[in-house]
Amino acid sequence: MKAPKDQWVIQIDVTNACVRKCSNCTRFCGFHKQPYFMDYDYFCKAVDSLIDHPGLIGIMGGEPTLHPRFAEMCQYLQSKIPLKYRVDDEDLFYPTDSFIEVRRKSELKQYEIHEYSDGPRPIIQGAGLWTSMTKLYKDNLEIIQDTFNFQNLNDHTNISYHQPVLISRKDMGIDDKKWEQLREKCWVNQEWSGAITPKGCFFCEVAGALDMLYDGPGGLPLEDGWWQRPIKDFESQFRWCELCGIPLKTFSRDAREELSDISQTDYQLLKKLDTVDFHKNALNLVEINNGAITADSIKKTALYHGVSYMEDAQNRLSVNNPIYAGSFIGITIYDSEHEIDLEVIECNLKYLEQIFIVSDGRIKKVIDKQGDRVCDELLRVCDLKSRFGTNVYMFIMTPDIELGEGVARLKNSVVNPGILHRIDIKKDIIDKSYINNGVVGGKCVLINALAQSLKAANGNEIIDISIFDKLDKLWVSRKRVTLNSDMNKNMYGVSVDCRSIDTIKRRLGDVINLIHRFIKEYGGLKVCMYSIKLTKRYGFKLMRQKVKNRFF
Ligand code: SF4
Ligand code: SF4
């Protein structure tokens, strides 16, 4: 068995609450008497204990963003993770219609090879997030992008396969000798993580979750250096393997079926917990005959053992996910020198849901496709959130600005709410992407009220013609991008066609860059030896699948 010191990630399970109820969830979401939310101070201690571990500090649930102190947890991680492992990729600041592609590209840049005691392995250091990308993910997008240089994303709306966990080897009639061999090779232990739960430290994330589910004795105490302990110190936790079907050859089930497979021993234990979900037809008690689960008892779309978790990384995110940008509105600022140009307003209404006409810091008129209405309302920076909400992106502009077609594309894109997208027609190069027309001196910014930079404002700033300079001063300089075709660098259209020649070529190019970097850093001979060692360890078929899943 692998000890945590040789694992590439150790998870901190901050909650077992989740918005989903996937089949065969390794955290058994829905089957607990009550979900937990990890104590914040304990979380900080968990992070501190892992700072020297060579690998990722994973933040996992359940759904971690449901934790009421999730944003503070991100800040704590930022304060503790050494600078060299912090996110430093300005590509992440640009809007994208291919979010998974951009994350994958960014992560490829960060791989390094680490020599663990059981051999080399390509790893990423820093902080990792495992999430099913709810609306809360979107609300926290800026801080998430700033904190986690690795993100394991899956909104579970497309097909992905989960192997049954709650299957006992004794129910399958596996004798001790054979079991020991199977357990030694358990793929979760070999390929994945140890874990810290509110009840201590575990050599295996699933063991930690089983301890939580069945109210076990807990793990090793959370103290500095716990992860350096040899595997024999974790031996008492092998008790959970007895109730775990991961090392067994069974089958895989589509996570969206919301049906968890279970064998008799686990069933009886779970029955004692008497939870609501236990009684809700969310379990499939399998029949076992001659050491195999009968086909009839599997039900529905379960597949054979060894099926790929997911065919293409793009399937991790549905185009309907709330992460895609919400509404776009305009706030057009007039002063005594300008008059309302109805042609420009009409043109901008092609892309915007509403346009607010503002003068002297007050909203004077609201125009949409149905018509207009007069009003008189003060508008300050601190009002933006309550007035427009967090799902709304605002173009604040001078009256001459006519928006371009790129704005329509933004509606199907992920736009980091922390970015100031801006253009000053006196200083910046304009092209037709986002600004179709404007006069010298014209200005336009695109912002979201969630931006961290706005928190630096005292909030009383009036939205008048001086707001452009004020925002410029308020904003963190690295989070400003120009509203022109530079913003298209992450528009791949991959969510539309992930198998196009362009996509394949680009992905191949990224992998070649990675190999090139590895050769520069480690030398060609070492890279070859590493590749041979890894292929020997995993076997050609598994290695091919890993490369495909991770890099393509
Ligand atoms: S999203 Fe993840 S944690 Fe939530 S139920 Fe599904 S597998 Fe479990
Ligand atoms: S058998 Fe289950 S509990 Fe044991 S190491 Fe494997 S995944 Fe973890």
Image (cartoon, rainbow, N blue to C red):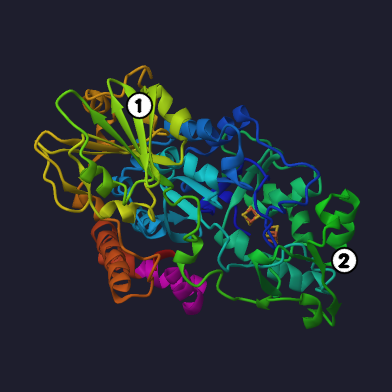
Label 2 sits on residue: 264
Q: What separation in Å lies between label 2 and label 1 (alpha carbons)? A: 66 Å
SS at mark 1? strand
Is 502 or 421 nearer to us in this picture?
A: 421
> Badge 2 local density, few (<14 within 10 Å), some, or many (20+)?
some
Query: Mark 2 is on which residue type?
Result: Gln
Is 92 or 423 nearer to us in this picture?
A: 423
Q: Quadrant of the N terminus?
A: bottom right
Extent of the magenta region: 529-549
- Left or right: 14 in relation to 93: right
Label 1 sits on residue: 363
- Left or right: 541 in relation to 231: left
| Mark identifier at residue 90 | none
Tag 2 and tag 1, C-beta contact below 8 Å: no
- Left or right: 17 in relation to 71: right
Q: Quadrant of the C terminus?
A: bottom left
- Left or right: 252 in relation to 327: right
Q: Position of residue 388 (x, y in %)?
A: 44, 34
Q: Position of residue 381 (x, y in %)?
A: 37, 24
Above or below 526: residue 79: above
The first of marks 2 and 1 along the sequence is 2
Query: Mark 1 is on which residue type?
Result: Ile
Chief secondary structure of the magenta span? helix
Q: Is residue 208 magenta?
A: no
Is 550 or 399 nearer to us in this picture?
A: 399
Residue 72 appearing in the image: yes
Q: Is residue 546 magenta?
A: yes
For marks 2 and 1, give the one nearer the viewer: 1
Count the marks: how many? Answer: 2
